[in-house]
Amino acid sequence: MSKNIGNPMIRMESNAKKGEIIEVRSLIMHPMSTGLMKDKAGKIIPAHIIQTVNITFNDKPLLDVDWSTAVSANPYLAFKLRAEDSGTLKMVWKDNKGGVWSADAKLTVA
């Protein structure tokens, strides 16, 4: 795998009041090649895309995302989360070539 792939990042508040809505933002470095482009020699570049993003909070499913070739390179994902309990948000990205990357972020609710 290329070293230009991976490096998943999650950005969100680490502290929130109970019931507060916080924004979760994530980014991962990935080419998201559609399989329709050609290299300089005219050879088709094989498809290489992130297919799923699974998000859990305290090991409970929160969001499952299915992506396709229509998603741009280095995909960014943002969503809102109501802070009800302290815990760990975990995201796992999986691509069509067996690549798996994960990141987590802690949230303390007061």
Image (cartoon, rainbow, N blue to C red):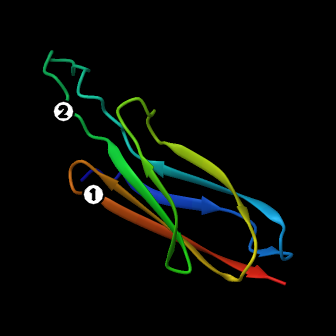
In the image, what residue occupies the spot 48% across and 59% down?
A: 8
- x and y percentages locating residue 16 in the rendered image: 82, 73
Left/right of residue 86 with respect to residue 54 in the rendered view: right
Earlier along the polypeptide chain: callout 2 or callout 1? 2
- How many labels, in total? 2
In the image, residue 93 above or below residue 38: below
Q: Where is 18 relative to 50, above or below? A: below
In the rendered image, the vertical position of residue 95 relative to residue 8, given as above or below:
above
- Which residue is located at x 55 percent, y 44 percent? 76
Residue holding disc 1: 99
Q: Amino acid at mark 2?
A: Pro
Question: Could you say which is closer to the camera, residue 22 or residue 42?
Answer: 22
Left or right, 110 with reference to 51: right
Locate residue 21, reporting x and y percent. Answer: 80, 61
Which of the two residues, 62 or 47, is positioned nearer the viewer here? 62
The residues bearing labels 2 and 1 have C-alpha atoms spaced at a distance of 15 Å
Image x and y of residue 100, in percent: 32, 62
Please name the residue shown 84% across and 84% down the image: 110
What label does residue 26 carry, if any?
none
Give the camera-side residue of 40 and 59: 59
Up the image or down, 46 lies above or below 15; here it is above
User: Which quadrant of the figure has residue 22?
Assistant: bottom right
Q: Specify few, some or many for label 2: CA neighbours under 10 Å numbering under 14, 14-19, or 20 or more.
A: few
- Residue farthest along the top direction in this orientation: 42
Mark 1 is on which residue type? Gly
- Which residue is denoted by mark 2 in the rendering? 46
Q: Residue at x 13, y 21 (%)?
A: 43
In the figure, is residue 35 to the left or right of 65? left
